[in-house]
Image (cartoon, rainbow, N blue to C red):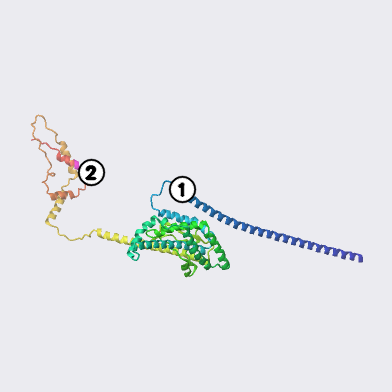
């Protein structure tokens, strides 16, 4: 018995040891599986990061390739222009001043290609791009105006009319055609002009713009240094010089045209005086029909900021040029809410227009109805006034004649009797009888004196007898029979 109990105890210990070993094995297997799963997750995360880096690299490569493609297009256009200059055919005008169609073509080239090449690193920062792009244009307009004033002052000094305002105004009017005709020679785009304009006037203003720019994500000093390096690279490139040269040609057309062309540009100093981003920049909802997007083909309805407003001639847009904008897919909440408020304003304006149009239509209809009623009243005949008129003697006689004529109307029975009497009379006499002139015999009922004019009128107006007036066919038949009876001569023997 003791040996059996010992065996049982030994067997139980062996079973317990086996269970512990199985649990340890299962735990080790679970740990291995979890380690494998973690390693797989790490590899997947690393692969996702690699794919993201590749996508960003691909996007940057695509942007560079598009910029290169546009540069090649600009070179192709330059070559085409050179070929046209070497050709024998010329424009239909001898003036060197750009035509409106040429101005529009230059503006489209500036907005589609040249501005992207001039500011490639600032397209995602509208708070830097808009003031930089507008400052260079403002500087060109100011410089050409100063040059023109200086040339006029020198001419007036040579003519000894420098202090005479009337003479200066007269000189200004007379020299406009000369300045337009020889604009490219009078206002030459030289290297000295470019260096003075860009490096001495433009860059200091851009430094102020970058210093005042605030970026909430990173430190301002680091960002300022990076943006200044980007700006130096952009200004020292050939693309920026091509951009400024195209702007120079456009500004000559703007400043020398008559009547003058205006652009609603804002200097950086004036922009800083305004409070809030909504007042400093002009935001709009993007639509292809109303706006032109500089940086590609965005979706409809995105918020957009105006880089270059359209040139205006008086109150009208010059050559139908649209506002040039860049879209803001990741705009702030304030800008998005402002765009939504613009939508509501447009809807309310449309509703007001509809209501005003409906009111105008109703007023027009009321006016038309009033005019029609007045015309009806004018055309409306006067109402007949029934009066108890006492008949005169002539009117009484006329009424009696009417009665007599109606009584003398021929009944159908008498007509039959006349036909029978006519049929019994021989048509001609025998040969032995002497011929005499025929004497017509007429029924005395049909004979009457010649009626007067008044009686004839009454007879024409008087109604026909009932026997004859039943149908128009009977009337015609009876009339023919009566006429035949009255016209046939009746011969009687002597």
Which one is in front, 83 or 360?
83
Give the percent coordinates (x, y) of residue 45: 66, 60
Q: Which quadrant does the C terminus fall into?
A: top left
Q: Which residue is drawn at 33% across and 65% down?
A: 165
On screen, 39 above or below 441?
Answer: below
Q: Is residue 474 shown in magenta?
A: yes
Q: Which quadrant does the N terminus fall into?
A: bottom right
Q: Which of marks 1 and 2 is nearer the N terminus?
A: 1
Give the percent coordinates (x, y) of residue 145: 41, 62
Give the percent coordinates (x, y) of residue 226: 57, 64
Q: Distance between the residues labelled 1 and 2?
A: 100 Å
Callout 2 secondary element: helix
Q: How crowded is mark 2: few (under 14 residues within 10 Å), some or many (20 or more)?
A: few
Q: Residue at x 49, y 67 (%)?
A: 277
Give the percent coordinates (x, y) of residue 173: 35, 60
Q: How crowded is mark 1: few (under 14 residues within 10 Å), some or many (20 or more)?
A: few
Q: Is residue 478 shown in magenta?
A: yes
Q: Which residue is drawn at 85% across and 63% down?
A: 14
38 left or right, relative to 102:
right
> From where the camera sits, is residue 76 visible?
yes
- For the stretch drawn in magenta, the main secondary structure is helix
391 left or right, relative to 171:
left
| Residue situated furthest top in the rendering | 432
Tell me where residue 40 sits by quadrant.
Answer: bottom right
Residue 137's tag is none
Q: Disc 1 vs disc 2: which is toward the camera?
A: 1
Residue 474's tag is 2
Boundaries of the magenta span: 470-480
Cβ–Cβ below 8 Å for labels 1 and 2? no
Callout 1 secondary element: helix
Residue 83's tag is 1
Which one is in front, 210 or 104?
210
């Amino acid at each position: 018995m003791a040996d059996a109990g010992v065996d049982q105890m030994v067997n139980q210990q062996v079973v317990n040891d086996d269970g512990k070993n199985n649990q340890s094995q299962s735990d080790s297997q679970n740990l291995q599986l979890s380690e494998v799963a973690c390693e797989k997750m790490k590899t997947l995360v690393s692969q996702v990061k690699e794919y993201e880096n590749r996508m960003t690299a691909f996007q940057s490569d695509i942007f560079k390739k598009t910029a290169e493609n546009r540069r090649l297009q600009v070179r192709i256009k330059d070559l085409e222009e050179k070929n046209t200059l070497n050709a024998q055919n010329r424009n239909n005008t001898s003036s060197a001043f750009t035509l409106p169609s040429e101005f529009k073509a230059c503006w489209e080239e500036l907005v589609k290609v040249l501005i992207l090449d001039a500011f490639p690193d600032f397209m995602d920062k509208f708070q830097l791009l808009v003031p930089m792009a507008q400052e260079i244009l403002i500087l060109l307009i100011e410089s050409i105006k100063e040059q023109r004033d200086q040339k006029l002052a020198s001419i007036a000094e040579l003519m000894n009319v420098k202090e005479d305002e009337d003479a200066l105004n007269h000189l200004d009017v007379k020299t406009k055609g000369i300045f337009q005709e020889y604009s490219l020679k009078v206002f030459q785009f030289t290297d000295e002009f470019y260096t003075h304009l860009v490096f001495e006037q433009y860059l200091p203003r851009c430094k102020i713009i970058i210093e005042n720019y605030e970026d909430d994500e990173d430190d301002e000093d680091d960002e300022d240094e990076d943006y200044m390096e980007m700006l130096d690279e952009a200004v020292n490139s050939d693309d920026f010089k091509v951009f400024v040269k195209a702007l120079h040609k456009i500004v000559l057309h703007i400043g020398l045209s008559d009547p003058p062309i205006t652009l609603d540009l804002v200097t950086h100093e004036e922009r800083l005086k305004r409070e809030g981003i909504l007042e400093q920049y002009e935001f709009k909802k993007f639509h292809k029909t109303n706006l032109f997007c500089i940086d590609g083909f965005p979706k409809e309805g995105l918020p957009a900021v105006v880089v270059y407003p359209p040139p205006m001639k008086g109150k009208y847009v010059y050559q139908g040029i649209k506002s040039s904008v860049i879209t803001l897919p990741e705009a702030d909440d304030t800008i998005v809410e402002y765009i939504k408020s613009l939508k509501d304003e447009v809807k309310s304006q449309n509703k007001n227009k509809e209501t005003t149009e409906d009111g105008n239509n109703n007023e027009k209809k009321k006016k038309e109805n009033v005019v029609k009623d007045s015309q009806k009243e004018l055309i409306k005949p006067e109402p007949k006034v029934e009066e108890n008129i006492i008949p005169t003697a002539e009117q009484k006689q006329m009424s009696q004649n009417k009665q007599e004529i109606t009584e003398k109307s021929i009944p159908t029975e008498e007509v039959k009797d006349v036909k029978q009497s006519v049929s019994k009379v021989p048509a001609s006499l025998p040969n032995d009888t002497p011929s005499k002139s025929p004497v017509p015999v007429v029924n005395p009922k049909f004979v009457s004196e010649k009626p007067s004019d008044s009686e004839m009128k009454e007879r024409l107006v008087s109604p026909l007898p009932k026997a004859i007036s039943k149908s128009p066919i009977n009337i015609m038949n009876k009339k023919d029979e009566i006429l035949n009876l009255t016209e046939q001569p009746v011969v009687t023997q002597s």
